[in-house]
Amino acid sequence: MSQLENKVAIVTGAASGIGLACAQRYAAEGATVIGMDRNLSSDWPSVEALAPVSRFHQVDVTDGGAQRVAVAETLNEFGVIDILLTAAGLGDGGPVSMLDEDVWDRVIDVNLKGTFLSIKAVLDAMMAQRSGSIITIASVEGLNGTEGGSAYNASKGGVVMLSKNVAIDYGRMGIRCNAICPGFIETPMLNDVMGLMPELKEDVIRETKIGRLGRPEEIAGAAYFLASDDASYVTGHTLVVDGGYTAGHSHGIVQMMGLV
Ligand SMILES: NC(=O)c1ccc[n+]([C@@H]2O[C@H](COP(=O)([O-])OP(=O)(O)OC[C@H]3O[C@@H](n4cnc5c(N)ncnc54)[C@H](O)[C@@H]3O)[C@@H](O)[C@H]2O)c1
């Protein structure tokens, strides 16, 4: 029997990319999955891809009230919330001198405050249950700086710290909280960015020690582990899943020595 059998999981950003892959993996492992996303149209994402999601709420994560309603409906129907995975997010930024204040506000609002509001919406239920696993999707850009990263890096660095603080504050109540820091993962978000800057893809692949971009399913694998009882003693952790992008720099020395 899978470790997620009979578990109830809420996944934000469930309509695309990493959130969708996590929702599909959780469902495949036997969980009842409640998806939240601001987008739900008949043709995007495909209804078929969302089929494993038991319920879908069209919610903007910056709206704390709407998230609370979705959580209340989930509790009403299923009685518990075992897992929260927060993948709703957007990428934007630029050098500070060139960055409009409203772009800064939007990125921080969705990526950081949205994550805070999602966690806040489930905590009462998890405290009452005295159990729960919260998994946030941060980024390697929340650990290291990136050229032009500004708002995005700040928002993801905030998510890493928020996740540690939730682990500290609620660990004694049986609630675990961990952040996943993906590297560069092939999703609609990354394809948009790479479409604007085609040279970036080659450069990123050169810096990624495994030599390719990541797949959303590879983040879902880590998200499955953190949600499962195999991770029962793992909390406050930042799990980097980046194909070695942040392992260190590579200057081709071993190739010069004939290793590859
Ligand atoms: N793709 C990558 O390389 C990468 C790397 C590191 C971190 N991440 C993070 O992973 C998460 C998922 O990104 P992705 O690459 O799958 O992107 P994506 O664009 O494919 O999916 C993001 C989803 O979040 C939803 N969303 C955006 N703003 C929302 C809001 N305000 N309320 C509700 N839903 C909202 C979108 O509608 C979309 O369905 C993001 O937080 C992103 O920052 C992605």
Image (spheres, helix red, strand yellow):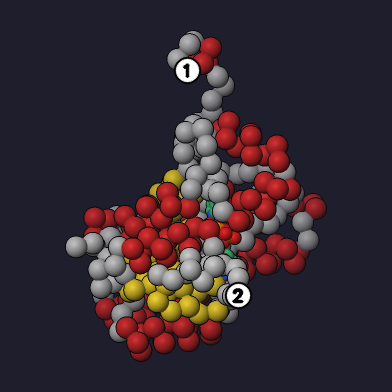
- Residue 5 located left or right of residue 66: left
Left or right of 61? Residue 32 is left
User: Which of the two labelled residues, at mark 2 and mark 1, occupies the earlier sequence position?
Assistant: 2
Task: For residue 26, say whether it is visible.
Answer: yes
In screen coordinates, is 256 left or right of 171?
right
Amino acid bearing label 2: Ser
Q: Is disc 1 surrounded by few (<14), some (14 to 19) or many (20+) residues within 10 Å?
A: few
Residue 41, labelled with which disc? Answer: 2
* Residue matched to label 1: 260
Distance of mark 2 from mark 1, alpha carbons?
47 Å
On screen, residue 40 above or below 202: below
Res 27 quadrant in image: bottom left
Q: Nearer the viewer, residue 156 or 18?
A: 18
Query: Does any atom of ligand 1 lie closer than 8 Å to the CB of label 1?
Result: no
Q: Where residue 69 sits in the image (x, y, percent)?
A: 48, 86
Query: Which residue is at a point 70% across and 37% down the rendered structure image?
Result: 199
Q: Are marks 2 and 1 in contact (CB under 8 Å)?
A: no
The answer to which of 244 and 248 lies nearer the viewer is 244
Q: Residue furthest bottom?
A: 76
What type is the residue that disc 1 sits on? Val
Kind of element beneath mark 1: loop
Number of numbered discs visible in the structure rendering: 2
Q: Is residue 46 left or right of residue 136?
A: right
Residue 176 in the image: state x and y as whole percent.
32, 63
Looking at the image, can residue 113 be seen?
A: no
- Quadrant of the picture in which ligand 1 is shown: bottom right
